[in-house]
């Protein structure tokens, strides 16, 4: 039975990417590897829409989230963390682990932070060093208006740190055009790779803070990576196979331009949302992301049973996280997930919902 | 041309391991993944010879080295770091990055720390919280006598932290039998995987220190991983494909017992050392490891030219690091490197040395 992995990470690996990673491993201190890494570094800049270096770490996305904290801040610094879901909460937890003073900007899950409200908080707290937020809050499938957020943060001395782990490649993102200072990526979402790589793109304004930051770091020390990136080298052994796969994945993403790649996902997202509306279901998010769609489980249906039922047909949707467990299910349409996969899965969703409802009535 | 990657990491990936990693990716919050991870956790205990949990991180080995520091210590603590090569130096750098006071125990590169000398230092510095060292110091291809070292550290309140990244599976190691408190592993050496996974096995004595430690950590927080390991779960997205490959690799390592796997490498190491002696060459290390052999470049030969020449025959040896650059070359015989690979490579080494010497004379 064909498997349909429609979760917001990991996402299916395109065949040519998988093939490249299955080739005999190469050493990382060779011209062959450095050539690949240079191509990767160039294309990552296109994907993030930035002229800044994009630093690559061997770790999950959370590692790069931590890197953004421990490289830019000092103990006792105050920061604003937008908490509108599980990943906003994670930024707050990381800051607190480092003795950074968190001013939470809490919003209802499924909504987005509004720039004027953030501007008020920034005016009342002029010593804030950074604002942490998401492009796509994966847990609620909500896209934030980073362009407007950046507009208000850029007027202050604070840096804007954006987790684009699930949004990159699906939701519109323009690091330099909007003025984002640190953008954090991960490999297993829109970049169509297995998990194990994470990224930090770092602006000039952020580098000025990095130089003053006194929090401890070693493995994630931005300066160590940045110093070697011009030589296409790494301070520590890189996750070689994933970098080799990333070259292929980025070729797919950039071959017709990143904008076209993103536009394809926008169309897939519209298709999914229209289909869901046609089933009489409602979306959880008021600002739905183009990377993943969260659907409210109808009252007549058991959310866990729905997901399990689909799994017996080879289809994996993600459930809700935290207090949303059992209340929503999430359909990813990022990365290498195809329209055909979505059509098949949505057809099965329709059937399964009908079965579960008629069983209940019967 | 067949490639012979005889470097001390990465090492060749066995075909069945590569095949398992090339299969369609699975989700990590599934029974299928948890079953694999449970097998991995059980077999890691066999490989480390411990009843302690072995925590798995998505990162290079250096990440787990940092984890051993930031989980067990507090700012201002004093530790002894044995510095007999590049990786000893790395432990000192990590400790210093965290404000930990390093008492260096420096030894000549290519030699090993002797337990009585360490005992003296421990007696003079009774507040030392930890001793950091290597099983195999990869940069000098030297195996340390961890059993004797543990004998003296165990008499004190300090914990013994041992980087077994390159030694595990090749040099004898017995975590519980010897009394090692934190053992740090990596995937791309004796474990026959690509780089991207690292490990910390943590003793009861170490856990008692972890509870008192106040250094900041989040991604590498031992407690987060340990809490979920009984459910075969991870706090953050694991490097799924590498864990899937690790199950296969550990099956190979444990199928005839770990001792037999290690014994095979001991024989390969003897074979290499005998061949080197037969060529009239000398070893760099006074206590040669069974994972990798460092050979002094003869005075009549240009070390860089020798390595480049072999590369044109598809054979990759590692050169020296730091001040040993050009002075030694290193032949790995760890992990999946076969006797046949070694025979071929050493034959070519002989030919190349003859060519380089006769060219010089001619």
Image (cartoon, coloured by chain):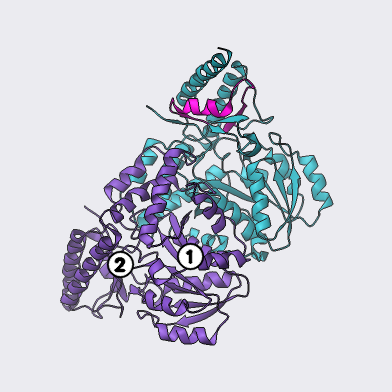
Chain colours: A cyan, B purple
Q: How many marks?
A: 2
Q: Which residue has dot 2 on it? A: B291
Q: Is residue B282 left or right of residue A115?
A: left
Residue A115 occupies which quadrant of the picture? top right
In reply to whether residue A197 is colored magenta, the answer given is no
Q: Which residues are magenta?
A: A290-317
- Distance from disc 1 to disc 2, alpha carbons, whole Å, reads 25 Å
Most foreground residue, B141 or A326: A326
Nearest the eye: B97 or A114? B97
Numbered circle sitting on residue B203: 1
* Residue A328 % position (x, y): 61, 30
SS of the residue at dot 2? loop
Q: Chain of mark 2?
A: B
In this view of the protein, which residue sits in the foreground, B362 or A273? Answer: A273
Q: Is residue A307 magenta?
A: yes
Tell me: residue A148, above or below residue B188.
above
């Amino acid at each position: 039975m064909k498997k349909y992995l429609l979760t917001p990470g990991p996402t299916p690996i395109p065949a040519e990417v998988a093939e490249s990673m299955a080739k005999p491993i190469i050493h990382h201190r060779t011209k062959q590897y450095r050539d690949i890494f240079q191509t990767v570094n160039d294309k990552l800049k296109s994907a993030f829409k930035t002229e800044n270096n994009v630093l690559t770490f061997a770790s999950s996305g959370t590692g790069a989230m931590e890197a953004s904290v421990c490289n830019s801040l000092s103990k006792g610094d105050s920061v604003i963390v937008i908490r509108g879901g599980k990943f906003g909460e994670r930024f707050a937890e990381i800051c607190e682990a480092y003795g950074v003073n968190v001013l939470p900007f809490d919003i209802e899950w499924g909504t987005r932070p509004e720039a004027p409200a953030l501007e008020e908080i920034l005016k009342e707290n002029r010593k804030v060093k950074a604002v942490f937020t998401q492009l796509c809050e994966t847990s609620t499938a909500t896209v934030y208006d980073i362009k407007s957020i950046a507009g208000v943060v850029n007027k202050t001395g604070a840096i804007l740190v954006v987790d684009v782990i699930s949004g990159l490649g699906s939701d519109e993102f323009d690091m330099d055009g909007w003025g984002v200072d640190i953008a954090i990526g991960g490999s297993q979402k829109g970049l169509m790779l297995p998990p194990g790589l994470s990224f930090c793109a770092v602006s000039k304004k952020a580098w000025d803070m990095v130089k003053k930051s006194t929090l401890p770091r070693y493995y994630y020390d931005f300066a160590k990576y940045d110093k070697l990136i011009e030589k296409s080298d790494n301070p520590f052994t890189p996750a070689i196979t994933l970098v080799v796969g990333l070259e292929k994945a980025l070729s797919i993403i950039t071959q017709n331009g990143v904008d076209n790649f993103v536009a394809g996902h926008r169309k897939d997202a519209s298709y999914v949302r229209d289909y869901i509306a046609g089933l009489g279901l409602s979306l959880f998010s008021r600002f739905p992301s183009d990377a993943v769609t969260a659907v409210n489980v109808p009252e007549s249906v058991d959310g866990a049973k729905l997901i399990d039922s689909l799994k017996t047909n080879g289809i994996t949707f993600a459930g809700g996280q935290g207090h949303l467990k059992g209340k929503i299910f999430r359909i990813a349409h990022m990365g290498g997930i195809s329209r055909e996969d979505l059509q098949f899965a949505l057809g099965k969703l329709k059937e399964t919902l009908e079965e579960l409802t008629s069983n209940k009535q019967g």
